[in-house]
Amino acid sequence: MLHELWHAARALLHPQLKTADLQRHISHAAVAVVPIRALAERHRKAVLSHLLELPPEDRYLRFGYAAQDAQIQSYAEGLDFVKDKVFGIFDRRLRLIAVAHLAYSQDSHAETCAEFGVSVLPHARSRGLGSKLFARAQVHATNDHISLMFIHALSDNSAMLKIARRAGASVERQGSESDAYLRLPAPSMHTRVSEMVDDQIADTDYRLKVQAKQFWEILADVQEVRRLAQDAQTKVSP
């Protein structure tokens, strides 16, 4: 996979980029990065399933109110995968265990702003997935010339505010709610390479998981047919 990533980077980026620097970046990314995939329209149902799995307290922290199934479904149906950016982390069963939404401002006077929201299933916590999703969204926002990334969260959402503070955001508390603001730099060769490599790793990881899932499904079908054949043979044996 590293060989393919190197050639893709050389083809897409400035030809004077030093080979050693690029190889070092890709090697580090392949080892350290959690595969985070940019989601599209075809993932809408998977995003909805993920959000519906959140327990009541997590729904409250994610949306700022006790969101019911119908409200979550309305939110999922309203996601704009073209204008905004949605990222996800899949497990080996292609189940979304973490989802981040980078929502671009609808205000014509604030076109360079984007709001970040994230959710992680309970069993997948304590692995830093929220922070990794924030970092991934931060790189994308930078490359998309977003100058200000912010989070609006309940003040009780200590995990979310901790992610923001670690990234260097300024946090302002207003009673039960808090706002975190992070100024982003201009895009650079480093941020462009980083996003390209992350996308390549995530795409490769996803394809491998799809192939593995298909293999195990076929194997399960074969084993079921074999079991039925053995049961039938047992019944007709004297």
Image (spheres, helix red, strand yellow):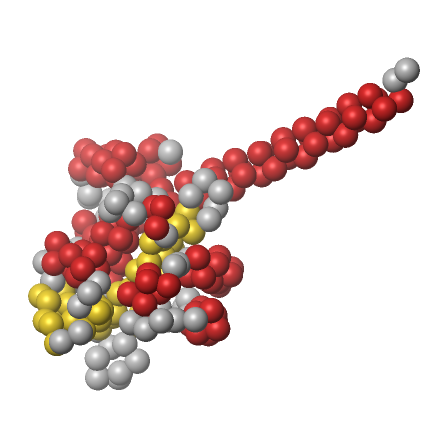
Q: Relative to residue 168, is residue 66 drawn left or right? A: right
Question: In which image quadrant can residue 201 be found?
Answer: top left
Tell me where residue 141 appears, x and y as whole percent. 24, 63
Q: Is residue 7 above or below residue 56?
A: above
Q: Is residue 169 above or below residue 35?
A: below
In the depicted view, which residue is nearer to us: 165 or 155? 155
Q: Relative to residue 57, is residue 147 drawn left or right? A: left
Residue placed at 10% from the left, 67% from the top?
Answer: 171
Quarter of the image containing the N terminus? top left
Residue placed at 51% from the left, 61% from the top?
Answer: 45
Tell me where residue 69 appears, x and y as whole percent. 47, 69
Q: Is residue 25 above or below residue 143?
A: above
Question: In which image quadrant can residue 159 be found?
Answer: bottom left
Tell me where residue 198 appears, x and y as whole percent. 31, 46
Q: Is residue 153 above or below residue 50?
A: below
Residue placed at 45% from the left, 40% from the top?
Answer: 92
